[in-house]
Amino acid sequence: MTVAKAGQRRAPLWARLCAISGCVLMLLSGGALITGQLLMARYAGAVQNKDLLGGRAAKVSDIMGPLNILLVGIDPRNDEQTPLSDSIIIVHVPAAMDQAYLFSIPRDLVVDIPPFDKTGFRGGRSKINAAMGYGSSLGNGKHDPAQGFELLAQTVQRLTGIRQFDAGAIVNFGGFKKIVDAMGGVTLTVDQHVKSEHLQPDGKPRPRYARCADNSCAHPYYGPQAEYRPGTYHLAGWQALDYVRQRYGLPNGDYDRQRHQQQFIKAMAQQALSRDVVTNPVTLDRVLKAAGGALTFDGKGHSVVDWGFALKNIRSANMVLIKLPGKSLYEGGDYLGEGLDPSATDFFAAVTRDSLATFLFEHPEYFSNNA
């Protein structure tokens, strides 16, 4: 195998973390208004709570750091389609509970996926994006992303050395769009020229070649493309979603897309805490309901609102975006997937020891550029 480089009481962030690509939300404000308690109760009631992590940990009395949260973004699919984790983001919150470190796992990272008794999967080596699919089968031709999340979490734990995630969430792309629209859009700095693989300049889907009806084509679309040029823009929901989905044509492929997703999470946190959202009960209610409908959550016995209060001291300014250096793997000219730089072993060890600040001081190359 050869390798080619490639002040007042603050409004809590109830979804401090968001997994996008589809992206993903735990990232908006719970509200600083007197009516905030009622709004948050309605939000918590709208969130779909499921056992994503296997139910192996009992609820503790308080949510205390250090914490590790797994966030996954998926495309909306029916239950007869195999779910794929198009965005995998880990959020590490240190013991002081005053920062959040976000890093993405490349969707094409080649990893060892452990056996999974629920589906009879015997384990094997594959791209990490497939783990959710291997774990999702219900045996009757249908699939459950929540069950697949459990195997994905086990796979990521094996990769990173994280013993057990403290919370997990799935957010679908369609729900993410509704959240951005409910906030009135999001202001985002575009750091490189991006052309859309999926949409036309007016936001309508690009037409597909007839010969690609069986999904056998790598690039099945044709016609004019929506474009995003360097600069700062206020994007509508469909634009933000489209932008953070793109990887084709980018110099560093999925690594560039990971950076864009992380940048979006930070921008979304800032937008969610703006006066336009948190001091406007109508907007806040609309945003909370949209988020509740988009989120599948496992807080290990704690509600998403409990988590929001626990993470109330984390602001967009102290969300640290991290990039994992990696390389494309080839064998005989065939692309196999992605591999991480050997230094990632030390990075993961720093996560499990809760010593990321020291690691990043010694390895500044891990800071995400243009964040």
Image (cartoon, rainbow, N blue to C red):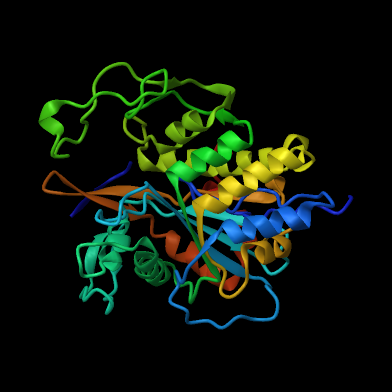
Report whether 68 appears left or right of 343: right
The answer to whether 134 is drawn above or below residue 314 in the figure is below
Does residue 270 appear in the picture of this structure? Answer: no
Q: Residue at x 60, y 56 (%)?
A: 101
Q: Quadrant of the C terminus?
A: top right
The answer to whether 179 is drawn above or below residue 89 in the figure is above
Q: Between residue 164 and residue 137, name the one nearer to us.
A: 137
Numbered label tally: 0
Q: Quadrant of the N terminus?
A: bottom left
Where does residue 256 sit, x and y in percent of width and height? 43, 38
Report whether 48 appears left or right of 252: right
Q: Residue at x 69, y 69 (%)?
A: 95
Report whether 215 appears left or right of 264: left
Does residue 35 appear in the picture of this structure? Answer: yes
Residue reaching furthest to the right: 8
Q: Residue at x 67, y 38 (%)?
A: 271
Q: Between residue 98 and residue 30, name the one nearer to us.
A: 30
The answer to whether 242 is drawn above or below residue 259 in the figure is above
Where does residue 326 sit, x and y in percent of width and height? 37, 50
Q: Between residue 129 and residue 320, name the one nearer to us.
A: 129
Where does residue 314 sit, x and y in percent of width and height? 71, 55
Q: Residue at x 29, y 57 (%)?
A: 79
Where does residue 205 sit, x and y in percent of width and height? 33, 26
* Displayed quadrant of residue 368: top right
